[in-house]
Amino acid sequence: MFWKRKKNKTAEFKCSECGKVHSEWPALTFKSPANYDFLSDKEKTELVKLDSDFCEIHYEDQIDRFVRVTLIQKVNDTCENLDYGLWVSLSEKSYSDYKSNFDNENHETGYFGWLCSVSSP
């Protein structure tokens, strides 16, 4: 993606996913958790269930569970926020609760999870 600063302090960027130019700030996202990224292609095919919001890695003796969440960072001197789509690991109980309430707008709770997103080298 690229940024182009205009005189009126708005920015444009070309999305690497759709190829279109957008004027609103992009959400910076990770397509998968780092634990997935570290797997071989064969392991990804054999062990993983992955979609845009959920990831399960089925090892022989355990299942690792991840969800994509949004971290919102307020930016000084602007009316826009910067959003990050990050992955966190959750326990089996928390993962099941999160997944079963994913589309429930009235469900409010908190979960403990470990951050599992890293930049590519």
Image (cartoon, rainbow, N blue to C red):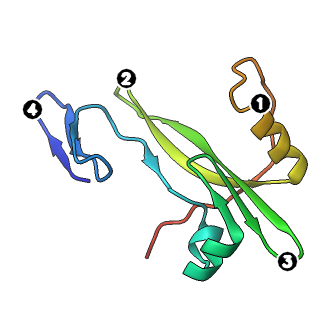
Assess disc 2: are there few (<14), some (14-19) or many (≥20) residues with their C-alpha within 10 Å of its C-alpha. few
**For mark 1, what is the residue?**
101
Camera-nearest residue between 120 and 37:
37
> Label 2 sits on what residue type?
Cys
CA gap, disc 4 to disc 2? 17 Å
Instruction: Answer yes or no: is residue 40 visible.
Output: no
The answer, for residue 7, to whether it is visible in the render is yes
Residue 52 location in percent, x, y? 56, 48
Residue type at mark 1: give it: Asn
Q: Residue at x 61, y 78 (%)?
A: 39
Q: Are marks 1 and 4 in contact (CB under 8 Å)?
A: no
Question: Mark 4 — residue?
Answer: 7
Question: Which quarter of the figure has residue 12?
Answer: top left
Q: Residues within 10 Å of mark 3 (few under 14, many from 20)?
A: few
- Classify 10 Å Cα crowding around label 1: few (below 14), some (14-19), many (20 and above): few
For marks 3 and 1 on the same chain, the one whose residue lies earlier in the sequence: 3
